Image (cartoon, coloured by chain):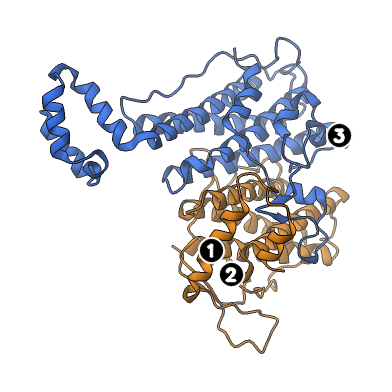
Chain colours: A orange, B blue
Amino acid sequence: MNKKEILTELPPNEVKGFSRRNFLGLTGGLLAAGALLNASCNNDDDSNPMPGVTLTNDDFGILNYAYALEQLEAAFYSRVVETGFYDGATASEKALLTDIRDHEIAHREFFKAALGAKAIGSLGVNFSTIDFKNRTSVLGTAKVFEDLGVSAYNGAGVYIQSTDYLLLAGKIVSVEARHAAYIRDLISNGTFASGDAQIDMNGMDISKKPSVVLAAASAFITTKINSNLP
Amino acid sequence: MNFSNILNEIVKVDPEFFEKTDQRRNVLKNIGRKVALTALPFAMGSVFQKAYGKTTDAIIDTLNFALTLEHLEAEFYKKAVADSSGLFPTPAALNAFVTIRDHEIAHVNFLTAGINAASPGAAVPVNPGGYDFTLGGALPTFTDYKTLLTVAQVFEDTGVRAYKGQAGVFVKNDLLTAALNIHSVEARHASHIRQMRAAAAGGSIAVKPWVTMSGATASGAPAAFDASYAGEQITTQANVNIINIGGTSVSANAASEAFDEPLSKDQILAIVGPFLL
Protein backbone atom coordinates (compact mmCIF):
# COMPACT_ATOMS: atom_id res chain seq x y z
CA MET A 1 0.00 0.00 0.00
CA ASN A 2 1.44 3.35 -0.84
CA LYS A 3 1.07 6.77 0.66
CA LYS A 4 -1.39 8.11 -1.86
CA GLU A 5 -3.70 5.15 -1.47
CA ILE A 6 -3.77 5.72 2.25
CA LEU A 7 -4.43 9.39 1.84
CA THR A 8 -7.26 8.64 -0.53
CA GLU A 9 -8.89 6.27 1.87
CA LEU A 10 -8.84 8.52 4.90
CA PRO A 11 -10.75 11.71 5.55
CA PRO A 12 -8.55 14.75 4.94
CA ASN A 13 -8.77 16.12 8.48
CA GLU A 14 -7.87 12.94 10.28
CA VAL A 15 -4.89 14.51 11.98
CA LYS A 16 -4.65 18.06 13.20
CA GLY A 17 -1.56 19.95 12.23
CA PHE A 18 -0.55 17.62 9.44
CA SER A 19 -2.60 18.50 6.43
CA ARG A 20 -3.10 16.12 3.62
CA ARG A 21 -2.06 18.80 1.17
CA ASN A 22 1.24 19.39 2.95
CA PHE A 23 2.12 15.76 3.03
CA LEU A 24 1.31 15.32 -0.64
CA GLY A 25 3.30 18.44 -1.40
CA LEU A 26 6.34 17.09 0.35
CA THR A 27 5.95 13.74 -1.32
CA GLY A 28 5.72 15.42 -4.70
CA GLY A 29 8.87 17.36 -3.97
CA LEU A 30 10.68 14.19 -3.24
CA LEU A 31 9.48 12.56 -6.42
CA ALA A 32 10.95 15.51 -8.28
CA ALA A 33 14.25 14.81 -6.60
CA GLY A 34 14.14 11.32 -8.03
CA ALA A 35 17.82 11.31 -8.90
CA LEU A 36 18.63 11.27 -5.23
CA LEU A 37 16.37 8.39 -4.41
CA ASN A 38 17.86 5.62 -2.45
CA ALA A 39 18.50 2.26 -3.95
CA SER A 40 16.68 -0.29 -1.92
CA CYS A 41 17.57 -3.87 -1.29
CA ASN A 42 15.23 -6.40 0.15
CA ASN A 43 17.45 -8.84 1.89
CA ASP A 44 14.95 -11.63 1.47
CA ASP A 45 15.18 -11.29 -2.28
CA ASP A 46 18.38 -12.91 -3.49
CA SER A 47 17.77 -11.82 -7.06
CA ASN A 48 18.16 -8.18 -6.13
CA PRO A 49 21.71 -7.14 -6.98
CA MET A 50 21.65 -3.65 -5.47
CA PRO A 51 24.29 -3.16 -2.82
CA GLY A 52 22.38 -2.08 0.22
CA VAL A 53 20.28 1.00 0.93
CA THR A 54 21.10 4.69 0.82
CA LEU A 55 20.08 7.41 3.26
CA THR A 56 19.89 10.80 1.59
CA ASN A 57 20.98 13.90 3.48
CA ASP A 58 17.51 15.40 3.84
CA ASP A 59 14.29 14.82 5.78
CA PHE A 60 13.57 11.65 3.84
CA GLY A 61 17.00 10.33 4.72
CA ILE A 62 16.22 11.03 8.39
CA LEU A 63 12.84 9.31 8.12
CA ASN A 64 14.45 6.30 6.44
CA TYR A 65 17.10 6.32 9.16
CA ALA A 66 14.31 6.09 11.75
CA TYR A 67 12.63 3.42 9.62
CA ALA A 68 15.85 1.39 9.64
CA LEU A 69 16.16 1.57 13.43
CA GLU A 70 12.51 0.68 13.91
CA GLN A 71 12.97 -2.30 11.60
CA LEU A 72 15.81 -3.50 13.81
CA GLU A 73 13.83 -3.06 17.02
CA ALA A 74 10.68 -4.65 15.61
CA ALA A 75 12.64 -7.66 14.34
CA PHE A 76 14.30 -8.08 17.71
CA TYR A 77 11.14 -7.97 19.82
CA SER A 78 9.29 -10.15 17.31
CA ARG A 79 11.99 -12.76 17.87
CA VAL A 80 11.70 -12.32 21.65
CA VAL A 81 7.99 -13.10 21.47
CA GLU A 82 8.25 -15.84 18.80
CA THR A 83 10.86 -17.74 20.79
CA GLY A 84 8.52 -17.87 23.79
CA PHE A 85 10.39 -15.25 25.85
CA TYR A 86 13.47 -15.83 27.97
CA ASP A 87 13.42 -18.42 30.73
CA GLY A 88 11.75 -17.15 33.87
CA ALA A 89 9.82 -14.31 32.23
CA THR A 90 6.85 -13.30 34.38
CA ALA A 91 3.34 -12.81 33.04
CA SER A 92 3.78 -9.06 33.42
CA GLU A 93 7.08 -9.10 31.53
CA LYS A 94 5.57 -11.16 28.72
CA ALA A 95 2.64 -8.77 28.41
CA LEU A 96 4.76 -5.63 28.39
CA LEU A 97 7.41 -7.03 26.06
CA THR A 98 4.58 -7.92 23.69
CA ASP A 99 3.35 -4.33 23.99
CA ILE A 100 6.82 -3.07 23.06
CA ARG A 101 6.92 -5.41 20.07
CA ASP A 102 3.60 -3.99 18.89
CA HIS A 103 4.80 -0.40 19.38
CA GLU A 104 7.92 -1.06 17.33
CA ILE A 105 5.91 -2.74 14.59
CA ALA A 106 3.58 0.26 14.60
CA HIS A 107 6.56 2.60 14.25
CA ARG A 108 8.11 0.50 11.48
CA GLU A 109 4.93 0.23 9.49
CA PHE A 110 4.14 3.89 10.01
CA PHE A 111 7.42 4.99 8.45
CA LYS A 112 7.02 2.49 5.63
CA ALA A 113 3.55 3.80 4.83
CA ALA A 114 4.45 7.47 5.25
CA LEU A 115 7.53 7.16 3.04
CA GLY A 116 5.69 5.16 0.38
CA ALA A 117 7.85 4.80 -2.71
CA LYS A 118 10.67 6.60 -0.92
CA ALA A 119 11.05 3.94 1.74
CA ILE A 120 14.21 1.89 1.83
CA GLY A 121 13.73 -1.87 1.59
CA SER A 122 13.55 -4.41 4.37
CA LEU A 123 16.83 -4.77 6.18
CA GLY A 124 18.46 -8.08 6.97
CA VAL A 125 19.27 -8.61 10.63
CA ASN A 126 21.73 -10.80 12.51
CA PHE A 127 20.88 -11.74 16.10
CA SER A 128 23.33 -14.64 16.32
CA THR A 129 25.03 -13.10 19.35
CA ILE A 130 21.80 -13.10 21.34
CA ASP A 131 20.59 -16.04 23.44
CA PHE A 132 16.84 -15.53 23.31
CA LYS A 133 16.24 -17.94 26.20
CA ASN A 134 18.60 -16.02 28.46
CA ARG A 135 17.12 -13.08 30.38
CA THR A 136 20.40 -11.22 30.72
CA SER A 137 21.16 -11.56 27.00
CA VAL A 138 17.70 -10.44 25.85
CA LEU A 139 17.30 -7.53 28.25
CA GLY A 140 20.88 -6.41 27.75
CA THR A 141 20.31 -6.22 24.00
CA ALA A 142 16.93 -4.53 24.49
CA LYS A 143 18.61 -1.88 26.65
CA VAL A 144 21.20 -1.21 23.95
CA PHE A 145 18.52 -0.85 21.29
CA GLU A 146 16.22 1.37 23.35
CA ASP A 147 18.91 3.71 24.61
CA LEU A 148 20.36 3.85 21.11
CA GLY A 149 16.93 4.68 19.72
CA VAL A 150 16.48 7.56 22.18
CA SER A 151 19.94 8.90 21.40
CA ALA A 152 19.24 8.56 17.68
CA TYR A 153 15.97 10.50 17.65
CA ASN A 154 17.36 13.15 19.97
CA GLY A 155 20.46 13.53 17.81
CA ALA A 156 18.57 13.59 14.51
CA GLY A 157 16.01 16.21 15.54
CA VAL A 158 18.16 19.21 14.72
CA TYR A 159 18.60 18.01 11.12
CA ILE A 160 14.85 17.76 10.49
CA GLN A 161 13.58 20.65 8.36
CA SER A 162 9.84 20.01 8.67
CA THR A 163 7.98 20.87 11.85
CA ASP A 164 5.51 18.07 11.12
CA TYR A 165 8.25 15.46 10.90
CA LEU A 166 9.94 16.83 14.00
CA LEU A 167 6.73 16.48 15.96
CA LEU A 168 6.27 12.91 14.71
CA ALA A 169 9.79 12.06 15.82
CA GLY A 170 8.98 13.65 19.16
CA LYS A 171 5.87 11.53 19.52
CA ILE A 172 7.92 8.39 19.02
CA VAL A 173 11.07 9.19 20.98
CA SER A 174 9.27 9.60 24.29
CA VAL A 175 7.73 6.16 23.82
CA GLU A 176 11.20 4.75 23.16
CA ALA A 177 12.34 6.45 26.36
CA ARG A 178 9.47 4.82 28.26
CA HIS A 179 10.60 1.47 26.86
CA ALA A 180 14.21 2.18 27.75
CA ALA A 181 13.34 3.03 31.35
CA TYR A 182 11.22 -0.11 31.70
CA ILE A 183 13.90 -2.40 30.28
CA ARG A 184 16.58 -0.82 32.45
CA ASP A 185 14.39 -1.26 35.53
CA LEU A 186 13.88 -4.93 34.63
CA ILE A 187 17.65 -5.34 34.58
CA SER A 188 18.18 -3.36 37.78
CA ASN A 189 15.33 -1.52 39.46
CA GLY A 190 15.98 2.19 39.78
CA THR A 191 18.30 2.51 36.78
CA PHE A 192 15.59 4.01 34.54
CA ALA A 193 17.66 7.14 34.08
CA SER A 194 20.87 6.55 35.93
CA GLY A 195 23.69 4.12 36.46
CA ASP A 196 25.77 4.61 33.33
CA ALA A 197 26.74 7.14 30.67
CA GLN A 198 23.31 7.44 29.06
CA ILE A 199 22.33 10.43 31.24
CA ASP A 200 24.70 13.34 31.70
CA MET A 201 25.37 15.63 34.68
CA ASN A 202 22.57 17.95 33.54
CA GLY A 203 20.01 15.17 33.90
CA MET A 204 19.75 14.93 30.12
CA ASP A 205 19.90 12.02 27.70
CA ILE A 206 23.03 11.72 25.59
CA SER A 207 22.15 12.33 21.94
CA LYS A 208 24.11 10.77 19.10
CA LYS A 209 24.65 11.64 15.46
CA PRO A 210 23.35 9.27 12.80
CA SER A 211 26.89 8.16 11.89
CA VAL A 212 27.58 7.08 15.47
CA VAL A 213 24.24 5.32 15.83
CA LEU A 214 24.57 3.48 12.51
CA ALA A 215 28.04 2.28 13.44
CA ALA A 216 26.64 0.81 16.66
CA ALA A 217 23.62 -0.73 14.92
CA SER A 218 25.68 -2.22 12.10
CA ALA A 219 26.63 -5.17 14.28
CA PHE A 220 23.02 -6.36 14.02
CA ILE A 221 22.19 -5.29 10.43
CA THR A 222 23.43 -7.34 7.48
CA THR A 223 22.19 -5.00 4.75
CA LYS A 224 24.74 -2.36 3.85
CA ILE A 225 23.52 1.14 4.75
CA ASN A 226 25.11 3.92 2.71
CA SER A 227 24.47 6.98 4.82
CA ASN A 228 24.85 10.57 3.64
CA LEU A 229 23.60 11.83 7.00
CA PRO A 230 25.91 13.64 9.44
CA MET B 1 32.68 52.28 23.63
CA ASN B 2 30.85 54.27 21.02
CA PHE B 3 27.83 53.20 19.11
CA SER B 4 29.65 52.63 15.82
CA ASN B 5 31.99 50.21 17.54
CA ILE B 6 29.08 48.30 19.01
CA LEU B 7 27.64 47.80 15.55
CA ASN B 8 31.01 46.64 14.29
CA GLU B 9 31.17 44.08 17.10
CA ILE B 10 27.75 42.81 16.14
CA VAL B 11 28.87 42.33 12.56
CA LYS B 12 31.76 40.16 13.71
CA VAL B 13 29.40 37.94 15.68
CA ASP B 14 26.56 37.95 13.17
CA PRO B 15 27.60 38.92 9.61
CA GLU B 16 23.99 38.86 8.47
CA PHE B 17 22.91 41.38 11.06
CA PHE B 18 22.61 44.27 8.64
CA GLU B 19 20.79 42.21 6.07
CA LYS B 20 18.25 41.58 8.76
CA THR B 21 17.99 45.12 10.00
CA ASP B 22 18.30 47.12 6.85
CA GLN B 23 21.45 48.71 5.59
CA ARG B 24 24.01 49.59 8.19
CA ARG B 25 24.12 53.14 6.97
CA ASN B 26 20.40 53.58 7.48
CA VAL B 27 20.59 52.21 10.95
CA LEU B 28 23.30 54.63 11.87
CA LYS B 29 21.62 57.53 10.12
CA ASN B 30 18.28 56.95 11.75
CA ILE B 31 19.78 56.55 15.16
CA GLY B 32 21.96 59.61 14.72
CA ARG B 33 19.10 61.73 13.58
CA LYS B 34 16.24 60.65 15.75
CA VAL B 35 17.56 59.21 18.94
CA ALA B 36 19.04 61.14 21.79
CA LEU B 37 22.22 59.68 23.24
CA THR B 38 20.61 58.81 26.55
CA ALA B 39 18.07 56.63 24.78
CA LEU B 40 20.69 54.43 23.12
CA PRO B 41 20.28 51.31 25.26
CA PHE B 42 16.59 51.22 24.42
CA ALA B 43 17.33 51.89 20.77
CA MET B 44 19.77 48.99 20.73
CA GLY B 45 17.08 46.77 22.10
CA SER B 46 14.76 47.88 19.34
CA VAL B 47 17.35 47.10 16.69
CA PHE B 48 17.80 43.61 18.04
CA GLN B 49 14.08 43.23 18.30
CA LYS B 50 13.75 44.09 14.65
CA ALA B 51 16.57 41.80 13.61
CA TYR B 52 15.63 38.71 15.50
CA GLY B 53 11.95 39.42 15.92
CA LYS B 54 9.66 36.86 17.31
CA THR B 55 12.05 33.98 16.92
CA THR B 56 14.23 34.98 19.80
CA ASP B 57 11.30 36.09 21.88
CA ALA B 58 9.47 32.84 21.20
CA ILE B 59 12.46 30.75 22.15
CA ILE B 60 13.09 32.68 25.37
CA ASP B 61 9.40 32.48 26.22
CA THR B 62 9.42 28.76 25.61
CA LEU B 63 12.53 28.25 27.70
CA ASN B 64 10.83 30.15 30.52
CA PHE B 65 7.71 28.04 30.03
CA ALA B 66 9.83 24.90 30.36
CA LEU B 67 11.59 26.40 33.37
CA THR B 68 8.22 27.09 35.01
CA LEU B 69 7.37 23.40 34.73
CA GLU B 70 10.81 22.27 35.89
CA HIS B 71 10.49 24.50 38.97
CA LEU B 72 7.13 22.89 39.72
CA GLU B 73 8.61 19.41 39.42
CA ALA B 74 11.81 20.21 41.29
CA GLU B 75 9.92 21.76 44.22
CA PHE B 76 7.52 18.81 44.28
CA TYR B 77 10.27 16.20 44.50
CA LYS B 78 12.28 18.30 46.96
CA LYS B 79 9.31 18.48 49.29
CA ALA B 80 8.52 14.78 48.88
CA VAL B 81 12.07 13.78 49.77
CA ALA B 82 12.24 16.30 52.62
CA ASP B 83 8.96 15.00 54.05
CA SER B 84 9.93 11.41 53.43
CA SER B 85 9.71 10.14 57.00
CA GLY B 86 7.33 7.19 56.78
CA LEU B 87 6.17 8.18 53.30
CA PHE B 88 8.15 5.75 51.17
CA PRO B 89 7.64 2.00 51.71
CA THR B 90 11.13 1.01 50.55
CA PRO B 91 14.58 2.58 50.21
CA ALA B 92 14.32 1.97 46.45
CA ALA B 93 11.20 4.13 46.25
CA LEU B 94 12.91 6.97 48.09
CA ASN B 95 16.02 6.57 45.93
CA ALA B 96 13.96 6.88 42.76
CA PHE B 97 12.52 10.17 44.01
CA VAL B 98 16.01 11.39 44.88
CA THR B 99 17.20 10.50 41.37
CA ILE B 100 14.30 12.33 39.75
CA ARG B 101 14.60 15.30 42.13
CA ASP B 102 18.24 15.71 41.17
CA HIS B 103 17.38 15.61 37.46
CA GLU B 104 14.69 18.25 37.85
CA ILE B 105 17.05 20.49 39.81
CA ALA B 106 19.65 20.00 37.07
CA HIS B 107 17.06 20.93 34.44
CA VAL B 108 16.20 24.10 36.39
CA ASN B 109 19.86 25.05 36.53
CA PHE B 110 20.43 24.25 32.86
CA LEU B 111 17.44 26.26 31.62
CA THR B 112 18.24 29.18 33.93
CA ALA B 113 21.80 29.32 32.60
CA GLY B 114 20.53 28.88 29.04
CA ILE B 115 18.13 31.81 29.26
CA ASN B 116 20.83 34.01 30.73
CA ALA B 117 23.26 33.00 27.99
CA ALA B 118 20.79 33.30 25.13
CA SER B 119 19.75 36.81 26.02
CA PRO B 120 22.24 38.37 28.42
CA GLY B 121 20.77 41.18 30.45
CA ALA B 122 17.49 41.18 28.57
CA ALA B 123 15.44 38.07 29.33
CA VAL B 124 15.00 37.07 32.95
CA PRO B 125 14.69 33.41 33.94
CA VAL B 126 11.54 32.84 35.97
CA ASN B 127 11.97 32.06 39.65
CA PRO B 128 10.16 29.32 41.52
CA GLY B 129 6.83 30.52 42.86
CA GLY B 130 4.58 29.28 45.63
CA TYR B 131 3.04 25.85 45.22
CA ASP B 132 0.08 23.99 46.60
CA PHE B 133 0.64 20.34 45.81
CA THR B 134 -2.38 19.29 47.89
CA LEU B 135 -4.88 21.46 46.00
CA GLY B 136 -6.08 23.16 49.15
CA GLY B 137 -5.86 20.03 51.23
CA ALA B 138 -7.95 17.94 48.84
CA LEU B 139 -5.04 15.63 48.07
CA PRO B 140 -2.96 13.87 50.79
CA THR B 141 0.02 14.32 48.49
CA PHE B 142 2.79 14.13 51.08
CA THR B 143 1.10 11.81 53.56
CA ASP B 144 -0.20 9.06 51.29
CA TYR B 145 2.28 7.19 49.09
CA LYS B 146 -0.20 6.27 46.36
CA THR B 147 -1.42 9.83 46.08
CA LEU B 148 2.18 11.02 45.93
CA LEU B 149 2.82 8.68 43.01
CA THR B 150 -0.38 9.72 41.25
CA VAL B 151 0.60 13.39 41.36
CA ALA B 152 4.13 12.51 40.24
CA GLN B 153 2.78 10.53 37.28
CA VAL B 154 0.51 13.39 36.22
CA PHE B 155 3.41 15.86 36.43
CA GLU B 156 5.74 13.63 34.42
CA ASP B 157 3.25 12.65 31.74
CA THR B 158 2.19 16.28 31.43
CA GLY B 159 5.82 17.43 31.27
CA VAL B 160 6.52 15.08 28.37
CA ARG B 161 3.56 16.50 26.49
CA ALA B 162 4.59 20.07 27.26
CA TYR B 163 8.04 19.74 25.70
CA LYS B 164 6.58 17.92 22.71
CA GLY B 165 4.07 20.70 22.16
CA GLN B 166 6.87 23.23 21.80
CA ALA B 167 8.83 21.29 19.16
CA GLY B 168 7.91 23.74 16.41
CA VAL B 169 9.55 26.64 18.25
CA PHE B 170 12.91 24.88 18.10
CA VAL B 171 12.96 23.60 14.51
CA LYS B 172 16.54 23.75 13.17
CA ASN B 173 17.65 25.56 16.33
CA ASP B 174 20.64 24.38 18.34
CA LEU B 175 18.57 24.48 21.51
CA LEU B 176 16.36 21.72 20.08
CA THR B 177 18.79 18.98 21.00
CA ALA B 178 18.92 20.11 24.62
CA ALA B 179 15.13 20.27 24.76
CA LEU B 180 14.88 16.77 23.30
CA ASN B 181 17.45 15.43 25.75
CA ILE B 182 15.36 16.77 28.64
CA HIS B 183 12.09 15.61 27.05
CA SER B 184 13.21 11.97 26.87
CA VAL B 185 14.41 11.99 30.47
CA GLU B 186 10.98 13.20 31.56
CA ALA B 187 9.57 10.21 29.67
CA ARG B 188 11.98 7.90 31.52
CA HIS B 189 10.74 9.39 34.80
CA ALA B 190 7.13 8.88 33.73
CA SER B 191 7.84 5.25 32.87
CA HIS B 192 9.41 4.58 36.25
CA ILE B 193 6.73 6.38 38.27
CA ARG B 194 4.11 4.33 36.41
CA GLN B 195 5.97 1.15 37.32
CA MET B 196 6.06 2.30 40.94
CA ARG B 197 2.32 2.87 40.82
CA ALA B 198 1.68 -0.57 39.36
CA ALA B 199 3.81 -2.13 42.08
CA ALA B 200 2.13 -0.12 44.85
CA ALA B 201 -1.31 -1.09 43.58
CA GLY B 202 -0.44 -4.76 43.31
CA GLY B 203 -2.22 -5.05 39.99
CA SER B 204 -5.41 -3.33 41.15
CA ILE B 205 -5.08 -0.38 38.77
CA ALA B 206 -4.57 -0.24 35.03
CA VAL B 207 -1.26 1.49 34.53
CA LYS B 208 1.61 0.56 32.24
CA PRO B 209 4.89 2.39 31.61
CA TRP B 210 3.28 3.90 28.51
CA VAL B 211 0.06 5.87 28.02
CA THR B 212 -2.93 3.82 26.87
CA MET B 213 -5.74 5.79 25.26
CA SER B 214 -7.09 9.01 26.78
CA GLY B 215 -8.72 9.67 30.10
CA ALA B 216 -6.88 9.60 33.41
CA THR B 217 -8.65 6.42 34.51
CA ALA B 218 -7.10 4.58 31.56
CA SER B 219 -3.78 5.50 33.19
CA GLY B 220 -5.01 4.51 36.65
CA ALA B 221 -5.51 8.08 37.85
CA PRO B 222 -8.64 9.92 39.01
CA ALA B 223 -10.79 11.49 36.31
CA ALA B 224 -9.93 14.89 37.79
CA PHE B 225 -6.66 14.57 35.85
CA ASP B 226 -8.33 13.89 32.49
CA ALA B 227 -6.86 17.01 30.93
CA SER B 228 -3.37 15.51 31.21
CA TYR B 229 -4.43 12.62 28.98
CA ALA B 230 -6.75 14.39 26.54
CA GLY B 231 -6.03 13.42 22.95
CA GLU B 232 -3.84 10.41 23.75
CA GLN B 233 -6.40 8.10 22.13
CA ILE B 234 -5.28 9.06 18.63
CA THR B 235 -4.58 6.02 16.43
CA THR B 236 -3.94 7.86 13.17
CA GLN B 237 -0.63 9.62 12.51
CA ALA B 238 0.01 11.82 9.46
CA ASN B 239 -3.13 10.38 7.90
CA VAL B 240 -1.84 6.85 8.36
CA ASN B 241 -4.13 4.55 10.34
CA ILE B 242 -1.94 2.66 12.81
CA ILE B 243 -4.48 -0.01 13.81
CA ASN B 244 -3.64 -3.27 12.02
CA ILE B 245 -1.26 -1.28 9.85
CA GLY B 246 0.38 -3.09 6.94
CA GLY B 247 -1.49 -6.32 7.62
CA THR B 248 -0.13 -6.55 11.17
CA SER B 249 -2.27 -7.03 14.29
CA VAL B 250 -1.50 -3.75 16.05
CA SER B 251 -4.44 -3.14 18.38
CA ALA B 252 -6.09 0.21 19.02
CA ASN B 253 -4.50 0.30 22.47
CA ALA B 254 -1.04 -0.39 21.08
CA ALA B 255 -1.60 2.17 18.32
CA SER B 256 -2.40 4.82 20.93
CA GLU B 257 0.52 3.80 23.16
CA ALA B 258 3.07 3.85 20.34
CA PHE B 259 2.81 7.64 19.92
CA ASP B 260 2.78 10.18 22.77
CA GLU B 261 0.77 13.27 21.89
CA PRO B 262 1.61 16.95 22.49
CA LEU B 263 -0.32 19.54 24.46
CA SER B 264 -0.32 23.28 23.82
CA LYS B 265 1.10 25.80 26.25
CA ASP B 266 -2.41 26.93 27.19
CA GLN B 267 -3.50 23.36 27.88
CA ILE B 268 -0.43 22.78 30.04
CA LEU B 269 -0.89 26.01 32.01
CA ALA B 270 -4.52 25.08 32.66
CA ILE B 271 -3.38 21.72 34.05
CA VAL B 272 -0.64 23.04 36.33
CA GLY B 273 -2.46 26.26 37.26
CA PRO B 274 -4.29 24.79 40.28
CA PHE B 275 -0.93 23.76 41.78
CA LEU B 276 0.45 27.30 41.55
CA LEU B 277 -0.25 29.82 44.31
Q: Is residue B1 left or right of residue B160?
A: left
Q: Disc 1 versus disc 3: distance between alpha carbons? A: 41 Å
Residue mark closest to the camera, 1 vs 3: 1
Task: Indicate the secondary structure of the residue bearing disc 2.
Answer: helix
Instruction: Give the x, y percent position of residue B148.
Output: 73, 23
Write down the quadrant of residue A130 in the picture: bottom right
Q: Is residue B246 left or right of residue A161?
A: right
Q: Are marks 3 and 2 in contact (CB under 8 Å)?
A: no
Q: Amino acid at mark 2?
A: Lys
- Screen quadrant of the C terminus of chain B: top right
Residue at image point 57% right, 65% down: A64
Q: Disc 3 versus disc 2: distance between alpha carbons? A: 43 Å
Q: Amino acid at mark 3?
A: Ile
Instruction: Give the x, y percent position of residue B123.
Output: 37, 25
Q: Is residue B49 above or below residue A1?
A: above
Question: Which mark is drawn over residue A60?
Answer: 1
Residue at image point 64% right, 50% down: A172
Q: Which residue is mark 2?
A: A118
Task: Indicate the secondary structure of the residue bearing disc 3.
Answer: loop
- Screen quadrant of the N terminus of chain B: top left
Question: Which mark is drawn over residue A220?
Answer: none
Are labels 2 and 1 assigned to the same chain? yes
Graded by Cα atoms within 10 Å as few (under 14), some (14 to 19) or many (20 or more), the crowding at tag 2 reads: many
Q: Are marks 2 and 1 in contact (CB under 8 Å)?
A: yes
Is residue A136 at all visible to an observer of this figure?
A: no
Q: Amino acid at mark 1?
A: Phe
Q: Is residue B176 left or right of residue A126?
A: left
Question: Which mark is drawn over residue B205?
Answer: 3
